[in-house]
Image (cartoon, rainbow, N blue to C red):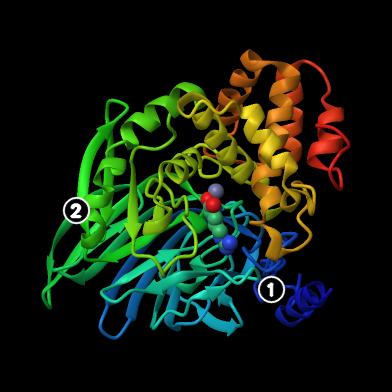
Protein backbone atom coordinates (compact mmCIF):
# COMPACT_ATOMS: atom_id res chain seq x y z
CA UNK A 1 0.00 0.00 0.00
CA UNK A 2 2.86 2.32 0.86
CA UNK A 3 4.26 1.76 -2.59
CA UNK A 4 0.99 2.47 -4.35
CA UNK A 5 0.59 5.71 -2.37
CA UNK A 6 4.15 6.75 -3.18
CA UNK A 7 3.51 6.14 -6.88
CA UNK A 8 0.35 8.24 -6.80
CA UNK A 9 2.18 11.10 -5.06
CA UNK A 10 5.05 10.89 -7.52
CA UNK A 11 2.56 10.91 -10.39
CA UNK A 12 0.74 13.99 -9.05
CA UNK A 13 3.95 15.92 -8.36
CA UNK A 14 5.28 15.19 -11.81
CA UNK A 15 1.92 16.07 -13.35
CA UNK A 16 0.11 13.59 -15.56
CA UNK A 17 -1.40 14.67 -18.89
CA UNK A 18 -1.08 18.44 -18.55
CA UNK A 19 -1.32 20.40 -21.81
CA UNK A 20 2.18 21.20 -23.02
CA UNK A 21 3.41 24.67 -23.91
CA UNK A 22 3.51 23.91 -27.62
CA UNK A 23 -0.02 22.46 -27.62
CA UNK A 24 -0.59 18.70 -27.61
CA UNK A 25 -0.57 16.62 -24.47
CA UNK A 26 2.45 16.14 -22.32
CA UNK A 27 3.77 12.65 -21.60
CA UNK A 28 3.68 11.26 -18.11
CA UNK A 29 6.50 9.99 -15.89
CA UNK A 30 7.34 6.32 -16.21
CA UNK A 31 6.40 4.28 -13.13
CA UNK A 32 9.00 3.98 -10.38
CA UNK A 33 8.56 0.22 -10.08
CA UNK A 34 7.22 -2.77 -12.01
CA UNK A 35 5.07 -4.04 -9.12
CA UNK A 36 7.03 -7.24 -8.70
CA UNK A 37 5.19 -9.25 -6.02
CA UNK A 38 8.35 -9.35 -3.86
CA UNK A 39 10.29 -6.26 -4.98
CA UNK A 40 7.63 -3.77 -6.13
CA UNK A 41 10.09 -0.92 -6.63
CA UNK A 42 12.60 -2.88 -8.74
CA UNK A 43 12.58 -1.93 -12.39
CA UNK A 44 10.76 1.02 -13.88
CA UNK A 45 7.90 1.61 -16.28
CA UNK A 46 7.65 3.37 -19.61
CA UNK A 47 10.67 2.07 -21.44
CA UNK A 48 12.48 -1.08 -22.50
CA UNK A 49 16.29 -1.27 -22.49
CA UNK A 50 18.06 -2.95 -25.41
CA UNK A 51 21.67 -2.26 -24.47
CA UNK A 52 23.89 -1.22 -21.59
CA UNK A 53 27.41 0.04 -22.16
CA UNK A 54 29.15 0.45 -18.83
CA UNK A 55 32.55 2.07 -18.52
CA UNK A 56 33.87 1.38 -15.03
CA UNK A 57 37.19 2.43 -13.53
CA UNK A 58 38.04 0.91 -10.17
CA UNK A 59 40.66 1.83 -7.62
CA UNK A 60 41.09 -1.18 -5.31
CA UNK A 61 43.05 0.80 -2.70
CA UNK A 62 40.30 3.28 -1.93
CA UNK A 63 37.43 1.13 -3.19
CA UNK A 64 36.40 3.98 -5.46
CA UNK A 65 34.35 3.31 -8.58
CA UNK A 66 34.02 5.79 -11.40
CA UNK A 67 31.34 4.91 -13.92
CA UNK A 68 29.57 5.97 -17.04
CA UNK A 69 26.47 4.07 -18.04
CA UNK A 70 25.21 4.49 -21.58
CA UNK A 71 21.76 2.95 -21.90
CA UNK A 72 19.86 2.47 -25.15
CA UNK A 73 16.11 2.04 -24.71
CA UNK A 74 12.76 2.44 -26.41
CA UNK A 75 9.89 4.41 -24.86
CA UNK A 76 6.75 2.33 -24.34
CA UNK A 77 4.67 5.44 -23.54
CA UNK A 78 5.01 9.19 -23.99
CA UNK A 79 7.50 10.02 -21.25
CA UNK A 80 8.03 13.29 -19.42
CA UNK A 81 10.48 11.61 -17.02
CA UNK A 82 11.89 8.18 -16.40
CA UNK A 83 13.44 6.33 -13.51
CA UNK A 84 16.48 4.12 -13.14
CA UNK A 85 17.38 2.10 -10.06
CA UNK A 86 20.64 3.11 -8.40
CA UNK A 87 21.61 2.77 -4.76
CA UNK A 88 24.40 4.78 -3.15
CA UNK A 89 27.06 6.51 -5.31
CA UNK A 90 26.88 10.11 -6.50
CA UNK A 91 25.47 11.13 -9.86
CA UNK A 92 27.53 13.88 -11.47
CA UNK A 93 25.22 14.36 -14.43
CA UNK A 94 22.99 12.69 -16.97
CA UNK A 95 21.91 13.22 -20.55
CA UNK A 96 19.02 12.00 -22.65
CA UNK A 97 19.75 11.94 -26.37
CA UNK A 98 22.82 14.07 -25.74
CA UNK A 99 20.97 16.87 -23.91
CA UNK A 100 21.50 17.44 -20.20
CA UNK A 101 18.63 15.98 -18.14
CA UNK A 102 17.43 17.11 -14.71
CA UNK A 103 18.41 14.56 -12.07
CA UNK A 104 16.55 13.75 -8.89
CA UNK A 105 17.27 11.03 -6.35
CA UNK A 106 15.02 9.47 -3.73
CA UNK A 107 16.09 6.21 -2.11
CA UNK A 108 17.17 3.92 -4.91
CA UNK A 109 15.07 5.74 -7.52
CA UNK A 110 17.04 7.97 -9.87
CA UNK A 111 14.67 10.19 -11.87
CA UNK A 112 15.77 11.81 -15.13
CA UNK A 113 13.69 14.54 -16.73
CA UNK A 114 14.74 15.09 -20.33
CA UNK A 115 14.57 18.55 -21.88
CA UNK A 116 12.25 17.21 -24.56
CA UNK A 117 9.74 14.56 -23.71
CA UNK A 118 10.11 11.16 -25.34
CA UNK A 119 7.44 9.87 -27.69
CA UNK A 120 6.09 6.36 -27.36
CA UNK A 121 8.07 4.08 -29.66
CA UNK A 122 11.12 6.36 -29.87
CA UNK A 123 14.55 4.88 -29.30
CA UNK A 124 16.67 7.02 -26.99
CA UNK A 125 20.02 7.01 -25.25
CA UNK A 126 20.66 7.90 -21.64
CA UNK A 127 24.07 8.54 -20.16
CA UNK A 128 24.69 8.70 -16.43
CA UNK A 129 28.03 9.73 -14.95
CA UNK A 130 28.47 8.51 -11.41
CA UNK A 131 31.13 7.74 -8.83
CA UNK A 132 31.73 6.74 -5.23
CA UNK A 133 32.46 3.78 -3.00
CA UNK A 134 29.75 1.22 -3.75
CA UNK A 135 27.83 -0.21 -0.79
CA UNK A 136 26.79 -3.88 -0.79
CA UNK A 137 23.07 -4.67 -0.65
CA UNK A 138 21.68 -6.88 2.13
CA UNK A 139 18.73 -9.03 1.11
CA UNK A 140 15.67 -9.69 3.24
CA UNK A 141 17.14 -13.20 3.79
CA UNK A 142 20.34 -11.69 5.21
CA UNK A 143 22.63 -12.56 2.31
CA UNK A 144 24.80 -9.92 0.69
CA UNK A 145 25.29 -8.96 -2.92
CA UNK A 146 26.19 -6.00 -5.09
CA UNK A 147 29.73 -4.66 -5.37
CA UNK A 148 31.74 -6.64 -2.83
CA UNK A 149 35.26 -5.52 -2.01
CA UNK A 150 38.05 -8.06 -1.74
CA UNK A 151 41.57 -7.52 -0.37
CA UNK A 152 42.88 -6.89 -3.90
CA UNK A 153 39.82 -5.91 -5.91
CA UNK A 154 36.09 -6.58 -6.07
CA UNK A 155 33.44 -9.07 -7.10
CA UNK A 156 30.07 -7.74 -8.27
CA UNK A 157 26.93 -9.90 -8.35
CA UNK A 158 23.27 -8.99 -8.35
CA UNK A 159 20.65 -11.60 -7.55
CA UNK A 160 18.09 -10.38 -6.82
CA UNK A 161 18.64 -6.68 -6.11
CA UNK A 162 22.39 -6.02 -5.97
CA UNK A 163 23.10 -4.66 -9.44
CA UNK A 164 21.75 -1.24 -8.51
CA UNK A 165 24.73 -0.85 -6.18
CA UNK A 166 27.13 -0.61 -9.13
CA UNK A 167 25.21 0.64 -12.16
CA UNK A 168 21.96 2.51 -12.86
CA UNK A 169 19.47 0.40 -14.76
CA UNK A 170 16.07 -1.13 -15.14
CA UNK A 171 16.83 -3.71 -12.48
CA UNK A 172 13.99 -6.17 -12.92
CA UNK A 173 14.47 -9.58 -14.59
CA UNK A 174 11.71 -8.84 -17.13
CA UNK A 175 13.83 -6.25 -18.99
CA UNK A 176 16.74 -8.11 -20.59
CA UNK A 177 19.36 -6.41 -22.73
CA UNK A 178 22.80 -6.86 -24.24
CA UNK A 179 25.82 -5.56 -22.35
CA UNK A 180 29.25 -4.19 -22.98
CA UNK A 181 31.24 -3.79 -19.78
CA UNK A 182 34.59 -1.97 -19.89
CA UNK A 183 36.78 -2.32 -16.81
CA UNK A 184 39.75 -0.10 -16.06
CA UNK A 185 41.91 -1.36 -13.22
CA UNK A 186 45.58 -1.58 -12.21
CA UNK A 187 47.44 -3.57 -14.87
CA UNK A 188 48.70 -6.16 -12.35
CA UNK A 189 45.10 -7.33 -11.82
CA UNK A 190 42.75 -9.43 -13.95
CA UNK A 191 39.37 -7.93 -14.86
CA UNK A 192 36.59 -10.31 -15.87
CA UNK A 193 32.95 -9.92 -16.75
CA UNK A 194 30.23 -11.64 -18.78
CA UNK A 195 30.61 -12.96 -22.30
CA UNK A 196 33.68 -12.60 -24.46
CA UNK A 197 36.65 -10.30 -24.11
CA UNK A 198 36.74 -7.97 -27.10
CA UNK A 199 39.77 -5.85 -26.26
CA UNK A 200 42.33 -5.13 -23.60
CA UNK A 201 45.04 -2.49 -23.58
CA UNK A 202 47.01 -0.09 -21.41
CA UNK A 203 45.63 3.31 -20.45
CA UNK A 204 47.11 6.06 -18.24
CA UNK A 205 48.23 5.53 -14.66
CA UNK A 206 49.58 1.98 -15.00
CA UNK A 207 46.11 0.73 -15.71
CA UNK A 208 44.53 -1.57 -18.28
CA UNK A 209 41.11 -1.21 -19.86
CA UNK A 210 39.43 -4.51 -20.71
CA UNK A 211 36.17 -4.69 -22.61
CA UNK A 212 33.72 -7.59 -22.25
CA UNK A 213 30.71 -8.14 -24.45
CA UNK A 214 27.55 -10.11 -23.69
CA UNK A 215 25.63 -10.08 -26.95
CA UNK A 216 22.69 -12.30 -26.06
CA UNK A 217 20.03 -10.81 -23.77
CA UNK A 218 20.87 -10.76 -20.08
CA UNK A 219 18.84 -9.87 -17.00
CA UNK A 220 20.66 -7.26 -14.95
CA UNK A 221 20.89 -9.54 -11.89
CA UNK A 222 23.21 -11.78 -13.93
CA UNK A 223 25.76 -9.08 -14.74
CA UNK A 224 29.08 -9.61 -13.00
CA UNK A 225 32.54 -8.16 -12.52
CA UNK A 226 35.62 -9.75 -10.97
CA UNK A 227 38.70 -7.61 -10.49
CA UNK A 228 41.68 -9.04 -8.65
CA UNK A 229 44.54 -11.47 -8.81
CA UNK A 230 43.36 -14.51 -10.70
CA UNK A 231 44.90 -17.34 -12.61
CA UNK A 232 42.87 -17.86 -15.74
CA UNK A 233 42.32 -20.89 -17.91
CA UNK A 234 40.92 -21.15 -21.42
CA UNK A 235 39.35 -24.02 -23.28
CA UNK A 236 36.74 -24.61 -25.96
CA UNK A 237 33.37 -26.30 -25.54
CA UNK A 238 30.70 -27.45 -27.98
CA UNK A 239 32.96 -26.92 -30.97
CA UNK A 240 33.38 -23.17 -30.78
CA UNK A 241 32.33 -21.77 -27.41
CA UNK A 242 35.23 -20.18 -25.52
CA UNK A 243 35.41 -21.32 -21.90
CA UNK A 244 37.13 -18.78 -19.67
CA UNK A 245 37.75 -19.82 -16.10
CA UNK A 246 39.55 -18.12 -13.26
CA UNK A 247 40.54 -18.85 -9.70
CA UNK A 248 42.32 -16.88 -7.05
CA UNK A 249 45.98 -17.96 -7.21
CA UNK A 250 45.88 -19.98 -3.98
CA UNK A 251 42.92 -21.96 -5.39
CA UNK A 252 44.14 -22.35 -8.95
CA UNK A 253 45.75 -25.77 -8.84
CA UNK A 254 43.14 -27.34 -6.59
CA UNK A 255 40.32 -26.21 -8.89
CA UNK A 256 41.98 -26.83 -12.26
CA UNK A 257 40.68 -30.38 -12.76
CA UNK A 258 37.06 -29.47 -12.09
CA UNK A 259 37.31 -26.32 -14.21
CA UNK A 260 38.57 -28.54 -17.02
CA UNK A 261 35.36 -30.60 -16.83
CA UNK A 262 33.16 -27.72 -17.96
CA UNK A 263 33.25 -28.64 -21.68
CA UNK A 264 32.22 -32.22 -20.91
CA UNK A 265 29.37 -31.17 -18.58
CA UNK A 266 28.11 -28.61 -21.11
CA UNK A 267 28.18 -31.20 -23.88
CA UNK A 268 26.00 -33.56 -21.84
CA UNK A 269 23.66 -30.76 -20.80
CA UNK A 270 23.37 -29.64 -24.41
CA UNK A 271 22.24 -33.18 -25.32
CA UNK A 272 19.55 -33.01 -22.68
CA UNK A 273 18.53 -29.32 -22.68
CA UNK A 274 19.10 -28.33 -26.32
CA UNK A 275 21.53 -25.84 -27.88
CA UNK A 276 23.70 -23.94 -25.38
CA UNK A 277 22.19 -20.43 -25.36
CA UNK A 278 25.33 -18.26 -25.16
CA UNK A 279 28.54 -17.65 -27.08
CA UNK A 280 30.82 -18.02 -24.06
CA UNK A 281 31.08 -20.08 -20.90
CA UNK A 282 33.28 -20.39 -17.83
CA UNK A 283 33.49 -20.28 -14.04
CA UNK A 284 35.25 -18.15 -11.43
CA UNK A 285 36.34 -19.44 -8.03
CA UNK A 286 36.81 -16.92 -5.22
CA UNK A 287 38.06 -17.25 -1.68
CA UNK A 288 35.54 -18.24 0.97
CA UNK A 289 34.08 -15.53 3.12
CA UNK A 290 33.08 -13.17 0.32
CA UNK A 291 29.90 -14.75 -1.05
CA UNK A 292 27.61 -17.00 0.95
CA UNK A 293 26.46 -18.84 -2.18
CA UNK A 294 27.44 -19.74 -5.72
CA UNK A 295 25.70 -17.72 -8.42
CA UNK A 296 24.88 -18.43 -12.08
CA UNK A 297 26.14 -15.06 -13.39
CA UNK A 298 25.68 -15.25 -17.16
CA UNK A 299 28.35 -17.30 -18.97
CA UNK A 300 30.64 -16.93 -15.96
CA UNK A 301 29.14 -18.37 -12.76
CA UNK A 302 30.97 -17.55 -9.55
CA UNK A 303 31.71 -19.94 -6.70
CA UNK A 304 33.10 -19.55 -3.21
CA UNK A 305 35.94 -22.11 -2.94
CA UNK A 306 34.04 -24.38 -0.56
CA UNK A 307 31.07 -24.72 -2.92
CA UNK A 308 33.11 -25.38 -6.04
CA UNK A 309 32.11 -29.02 -6.28
CA UNK A 310 30.75 -31.04 -9.19
CA UNK A 311 27.12 -30.85 -8.05
CA UNK A 312 27.14 -27.07 -7.68
CA UNK A 313 28.97 -26.69 -10.99
CA UNK A 314 26.29 -28.78 -12.70
CA UNK A 315 23.64 -26.62 -10.99
CA UNK A 316 25.09 -23.27 -12.06
CA UNK A 317 25.76 -24.47 -15.62
CA UNK A 318 22.16 -25.73 -15.90
CA UNK A 319 21.03 -22.21 -14.96
CA UNK A 320 22.51 -20.96 -18.23
CA UNK A 321 19.49 -22.60 -19.90
CA UNK A 322 17.02 -22.33 -17.01
CA UNK A 323 17.18 -18.88 -15.47
CA UNK A 324 19.62 -17.07 -17.74
CA UNK A 325 18.19 -17.88 -21.17
CA UNK A 326 14.65 -18.64 -19.93
CA UNK A 327 14.35 -15.92 -17.30
CA UNK A 328 11.60 -15.50 -14.70
CA UNK A 329 8.91 -12.97 -15.56
CA UNK A 330 8.91 -11.90 -11.91
CA UNK A 331 10.64 -13.04 -8.73
CA UNK A 332 7.59 -15.15 -7.96
CA UNK A 333 8.70 -17.49 -10.76
CA UNK A 334 12.10 -18.19 -9.17
CA UNK A 335 11.27 -21.90 -8.75
CA UNK A 336 11.56 -22.17 -12.56
CA UNK A 337 15.27 -21.36 -12.07
CA UNK A 338 16.03 -23.29 -8.94
CA UNK A 339 13.71 -26.25 -9.51
CA UNK A 340 15.21 -26.94 -12.96
CA UNK A 341 18.81 -26.43 -11.78
CA UNK A 342 18.17 -28.80 -8.87
CA UNK A 343 16.60 -31.31 -11.22
CA UNK A 344 19.72 -31.06 -13.38
CA UNK A 345 21.66 -32.20 -10.28
CA UNK A 346 19.29 -35.16 -9.91
CA UNK A 347 19.75 -36.08 -13.57
CA UNK A 348 23.51 -35.89 -13.15
CA UNK A 349 23.40 -38.09 -10.04
CA UNK A 350 21.20 -40.56 -11.89
CA UNK A 351 23.68 -40.81 -14.74
CA UNK A 352 27.01 -40.55 -12.93
CA UNK A 353 26.32 -41.42 -9.31
CA UNK A 354 23.82 -44.21 -9.85
CA UNK A 355 21.28 -42.44 -7.67
CA UNK A 356 17.96 -42.69 -9.52
CA UNK A 357 16.00 -39.43 -9.54
CA UNK A 358 13.23 -41.20 -7.65
CA UNK A 359 15.67 -41.58 -4.73
CA UNK A 360 16.58 -37.89 -4.83
CA UNK A 361 12.85 -37.24 -4.90
CA UNK A 362 12.26 -39.56 -1.93
CA UNK A 363 14.87 -37.87 0.22
CA UNK A 364 13.53 -34.42 -0.68
CA UNK A 365 10.04 -35.66 0.13
CA UNK A 366 11.16 -36.87 3.55
CA UNK A 367 12.80 -33.56 4.50
CA UNK A 368 10.48 -31.27 6.49
CA UNK A 369 12.39 -28.20 5.30
CA UNK A 370 10.92 -28.65 1.83
CA UNK A 371 7.31 -28.35 2.95
CA UNK A 372 7.10 -24.90 4.49
CA UNK A 373 5.38 -23.37 1.43
CA UNK A 374 4.45 -24.24 -2.16
CA UNK A 375 7.18 -23.45 -4.72
CA UNK A 376 4.83 -21.32 -6.84
CA UNK A 377 4.13 -18.97 -3.96
CA UNK A 378 6.97 -18.07 -1.58
CA UNK A 379 5.47 -16.19 1.39
CA UNK A 380 7.92 -13.25 1.30
CA UNK A 381 11.08 -11.90 -0.30
CA UNK A 382 13.15 -13.52 2.44
CA UNK A 383 11.96 -16.95 1.26
CA UNK A 384 12.85 -16.71 -2.44
CA UNK A 385 15.89 -18.98 -2.01
CA UNK A 386 14.48 -21.34 0.64
CA UNK A 387 14.49 -25.14 0.25
CA UNK A 388 10.95 -25.49 -1.19
CA UNK A 389 11.96 -23.33 -4.18
CA UNK A 390 14.84 -25.68 -4.95
CA UNK A 391 13.88 -29.18 -3.94
CA UNK A 392 10.11 -28.97 -4.05
CA UNK A 393 10.56 -27.22 -7.38
CA UNK A 394 12.53 -30.26 -8.53
CA UNK A 395 9.82 -32.53 -7.10
CA UNK A 396 7.28 -30.80 -9.37
CA UNK A 397 9.42 -31.68 -12.38
CA UNK A 398 9.83 -35.25 -11.19
CA UNK A 399 6.06 -35.65 -10.86
CA UNK A 400 5.68 -34.34 -14.40
CA UNK A 401 8.29 -36.85 -15.55
CA UNK A 402 6.50 -39.72 -13.79
CA UNK A 403 3.22 -38.65 -15.35
CA UNK A 404 4.36 -38.18 -18.96
CA UNK A 405 7.24 -40.66 -19.11
CA UNK A 406 10.93 -40.19 -19.83
CA UNK A 407 10.64 -39.57 -23.56
CA UNK A 408 8.06 -36.77 -23.34
CA UNK A 409 9.85 -35.33 -20.31
CA UNK A 410 13.07 -35.14 -22.35
CA UNK A 411 11.11 -33.28 -25.05
CA UNK A 412 9.77 -30.93 -22.40
CA UNK A 413 13.24 -30.08 -21.05
CA UNK A 414 14.43 -29.16 -24.54
CA UNK A 415 11.19 -27.61 -25.73
CA UNK A 416 10.82 -25.31 -22.72
CA UNK A 417 14.35 -24.02 -23.20
CA UNK A 418 13.69 -23.57 -26.94
CA UNK A 419 10.28 -21.90 -26.70
CA UNK A 420 11.42 -19.22 -24.22
CA UNK A 421 15.05 -19.00 -25.34
CA UNK A 422 16.46 -15.54 -24.50
CA UNK A 423 13.05 -14.52 -23.17
CA UNK A 424 11.00 -14.44 -19.98
CA UNK A 425 8.47 -16.94 -18.71
CA UNK A 426 6.09 -17.35 -15.78
CA UNK A 427 4.78 -20.31 -13.82
CA UNK A 428 1.56 -20.17 -15.86
CA UNK A 429 3.60 -20.24 -19.08
CA UNK A 430 5.25 -23.38 -17.77
CA UNK A 431 2.09 -25.22 -16.78
CA UNK A 432 0.47 -24.35 -20.13
CA UNK A 433 3.58 -25.47 -22.02
CA UNK A 434 3.91 -28.74 -20.07
CA UNK A 435 0.25 -29.56 -20.75
CA UNK A 436 0.70 -28.85 -24.44
CA UNK A 437 3.64 -31.26 -24.61
CA UNK A 438 1.84 -33.84 -22.47
CA UNK A 439 -1.30 -33.54 -24.61
CA UNK A 440 -3.50 -33.42 -21.52
CA UNK A 441 -4.12 -31.45 -18.39
CA UNK A 442 -1.77 -31.97 -15.47
CA UNK A 443 -3.98 -30.36 -12.83
CA UNK A 444 -3.40 -33.17 -10.38
CA UNK A 445 0.36 -32.46 -10.43
CA UNK A 446 0.03 -28.68 -10.14
CA UNK A 447 -2.62 -28.75 -7.43
CA UNK A 448 -0.62 -30.89 -5.03
CA UNK A 449 3.04 -30.30 -5.91
CA UNK A 450 3.23 -26.78 -7.28
CA UNK A 451 0.47 -24.92 -5.45
CA UNK A 452 -0.54 -27.18 -2.54
CA UNK A 453 0.14 -26.39 1.09
CA UNK A 454 1.95 -29.04 3.08
CA UNK A 455 3.14 -32.55 2.35
CA UNK A 456 0.66 -34.90 0.70
CA UNK A 457 -0.14 -38.26 2.29
CA UNK A 458 1.82 -40.36 -0.15
CA UNK A 459 4.33 -39.41 -2.86
N1 LIG B 1 20.81 -18.53 -7.47
C1 LIG B 1 21.81 -19.00 -6.54
C2 LIG B 1 21.89 -20.50 -6.75
O1 LIG B 1 22.02 -20.95 -7.81
C3 LIG B 1 21.52 -18.64 -5.12
C4 LIG B 1 21.43 -17.18 -4.83
C5 LIG B 1 21.15 -16.91 -3.39
N2 LIG B 1 20.88 -15.53 -3.20
C6 LIG B 1 20.29 -15.01 -2.15
N3 LIG B 1 20.05 -13.74 -2.14
N4 LIG B 1 19.94 -15.77 -1.15
O2 LIG B 1 21.73 -21.31 -5.92
ZN1 LIG C 1 20.44 -22.04 -8.38
Q: Is residue 429 above or below residue 82?
A: above
Image marks 2 and 1: residues in contact by CB distance under 8 Å: no
Sequence-first tag of 2 and 1: 1
Name the image quarter holding the N terminus: bottom right
Left or right of 405: which side holds 293? left
Per the image, label 2 sits on a secondary structure element best described as strand
The residue that appears at 57% across and 83% down in the rendered structure is: 105
Q: Which image quadrant for residue 39?
A: bottom right
Name the residue tied to disc 2.
Answer: 199
Q: CA distance from mark 2 to mark 1?
A: 46 Å
Residue under pointer 1: 20
Other residues around mark 2 within 10 Å, as few (<14) / some (14–19) / many (≥20): few
**Quadrant of the rendered structure where residue 259 is?**
top left
Q: Nearer the viewer, residue 422 or 250?
A: 250
Frontmost of labels 2 and 1 is 2
Compared across the picture, whether 68 is left or right of 233 comes to right
Amino acid sequence: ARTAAALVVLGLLAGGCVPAAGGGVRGTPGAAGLKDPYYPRLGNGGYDVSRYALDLAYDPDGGHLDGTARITARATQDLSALNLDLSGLTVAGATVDGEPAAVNRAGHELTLRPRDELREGAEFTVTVDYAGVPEPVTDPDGSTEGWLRTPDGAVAVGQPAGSMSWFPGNHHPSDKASYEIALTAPSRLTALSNGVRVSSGPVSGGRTRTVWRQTEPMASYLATVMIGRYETGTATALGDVPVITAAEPSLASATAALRAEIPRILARQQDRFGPYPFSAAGAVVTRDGLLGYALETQTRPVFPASSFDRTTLVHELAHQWYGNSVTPESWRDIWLNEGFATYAEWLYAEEHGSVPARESFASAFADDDNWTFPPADPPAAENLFDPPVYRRGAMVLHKVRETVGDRVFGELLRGWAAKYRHANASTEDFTAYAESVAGRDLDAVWKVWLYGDGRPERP
